[in-house]
Image (tube, grey):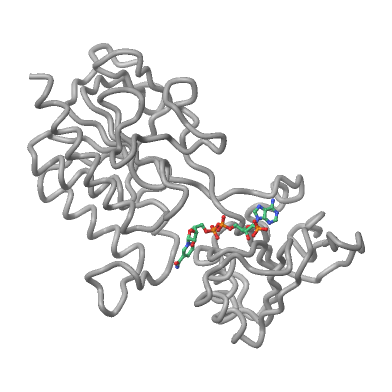
């Protein structure tokens, strides 16, 4: 641990649209925010391709480019953006104690949590075994390696459909394996999948085992209605079954629901601890959009500013 903890008015954890928007507002309000970017600087948009629904970009924008712009805008007003991950917190009294990378201790008068969410895994042993050797949770990161090959995507939501349609442009064939007989994805996204002639939807199936040698060469799937088991020959296996909020370090200190989403007061980003605010995907299981995350990041900074003003 460092000997003398650094004291901050406003600490922001996480660097997606929520964190950077909070940073822009907090910096402009002269709260001198410090941001720790977390494991994935720029957040989930850095592993997506085109963002076509963020207002202000009539031609769309690449996710990673947009996050570079967010960072520049936050830094322009003086946000101190740092690499590092919060590894533990003590929110029992103010200033809040936050430890970064298990060594550097900070004391923060207000804390804005925008730690986002991470991809979920199926939980198969073979999924871990072949992670990086044919198994991935990000088509835009790894799709390139499977050009001209056959791959499978698991899931029936917007992410799975987006990944399947992205991969269909690179790969010879894409299987979309879904556990039900209808997709959860939006109609627009379903349409994209249906019109790609090299995507085959495998309804009512779940993966039982990913098989291979040094790398993946197949997946064993089971029909959930009949129990019949089949093998698909594939080189790549993409898991797209949703996300888990990154809230583990707040367990026992902040109220969260059964999935780990932080609970905030209605029309607010206030958590159950005064001075701690939560914004973006870590507290939003409904909308999970860049623009809604940015909106709640703005709210968190305004609420942090008001909170500090009330303390004076
Ligand atoms: P969702 O939770 O919407 O979908 C997850 C999918 O995975 C569901 O079809 C679910 O099946 C399936 N699934 C979950 N667990 C398992 C399991 N253990 N085994 C097999 N299948 C499983 O997550 P998404 O990541 O797709 O989307 C999250 C949010 O982000 C949504 O609000 C979505 O609209 C949004 N989004 C928007 C995009 C866009 O507009 N461009 C792109 C990507 C996401 P079941 O349906 O049976 O529950």
Ligand 1: quadrant of the figure: bottom right
- Quadrant into which the C terminus falls: top left
- Seen from the viewer's position, the closer of residues 192 and 105 is 192
Residue name at image x 36 percent, y 35 percent: 264
Left or right: residue 114 versus residue 172 is left
Q: Is residue 126 above or below residue 65?
A: above
Left or right: residue 49 versus residue 6 is right
Q: Is residue 263 above or below residue 2?
A: below
> Number of marks in the image?
0
Left or right: residue 124 versus residue 69 is right
Residue name at image x 68 percent, y 70 percent: 176
Q: Where is residue 134 drawn, in percent x and y?
A: 68, 61
- Quadrant into which the N terminus falls: top left
Query: Which residue, as the protein is rendered here, is positioned at the far front?
Result: 266
Q: Is residue 47 above or below residue 62?
A: above
Q: Where is residue 198 drawn, in percent x and y?
A: 66, 84
In which quarter of the view is residue 112 placed?
A: top left
Left or right: residue 163 versus residue 19 is right
In which quarter of the view is residue 274 placed?
A: top left
- Seen from the viewer's position, the closer of residues 201 and 213 is 201
Residue name at image x 78 percent, y 58 percent: 207
Residue name at image x 21 percent, y 20 percent: 6
Q: Where is residue 125 drawn, in percent x and y?
A: 76, 45
Q: Where is residue 118 drawn, in percent x and y?
A: 50, 47
Q: Is residue 148 above or below residue 156?
A: below
């Amino acid at each position: 641990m460092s000997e003398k903890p650094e004291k901050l008015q406003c600490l922001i954890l996480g660097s997606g649209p929520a964190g950077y928007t909070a940073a822009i507002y907090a910096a402009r309000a002269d709260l001198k925010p410090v941001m720790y970017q977390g494991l994935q600087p720029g957040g989930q948009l850095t592993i997506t391709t085109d963002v076509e629904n963020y207002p202000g970009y009539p031609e769309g924008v690449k996710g990673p480019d947009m996050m570079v712009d967010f960072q520049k805008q936050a830094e322009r007003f003086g946000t101190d953006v740092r690499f590092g991950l919060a590894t533990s917190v003590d929110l029992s009294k103010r200033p809040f104690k936050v430890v970064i990378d298990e060594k550097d201790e900070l004391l923060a008068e207000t804390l804005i949590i925008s730690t986002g969410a991470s991809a979920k895994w199926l939980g198969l042993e073979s999924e871990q075994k072949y992670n990086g050797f044919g198994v991935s949770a990000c088509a835009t990161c790894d799709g390139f390696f499977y050009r001209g090959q056959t791959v499978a995507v698991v899931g029936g939501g917007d992410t799975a459909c987006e990944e399947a349609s992205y991969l269909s442009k690179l790969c010879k064939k894409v299987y979309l394996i879904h556990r039900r007989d209808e997709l959860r994805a939006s109609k627009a996204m379903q349409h994209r999948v249906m019109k790609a002639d090299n995507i085959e939807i495998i309804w009512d199936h779940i993966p039982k085992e990913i098989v291979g040698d040094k790398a993946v060469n197949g997946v064993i799937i089971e029909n959930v209605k009949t129990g019949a088991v089949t093998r698909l020959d594939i080189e790549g296996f993409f898991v797209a079954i949703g996300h888990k909020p990154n809230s583990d370090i707040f367990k026992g200190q902040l109220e969260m629901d059964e999935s780990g989403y932080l609970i905030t007061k209605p029309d607010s980003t206030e958590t159950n601890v005064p001075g701690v605010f939560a914004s973006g995907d870590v507290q939003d299981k409904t909308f999970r959009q860049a623009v809604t995350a940015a909106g709640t990041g703005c709210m968190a900074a305004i609420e942090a500013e008001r909170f500090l003003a009330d303390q004076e």
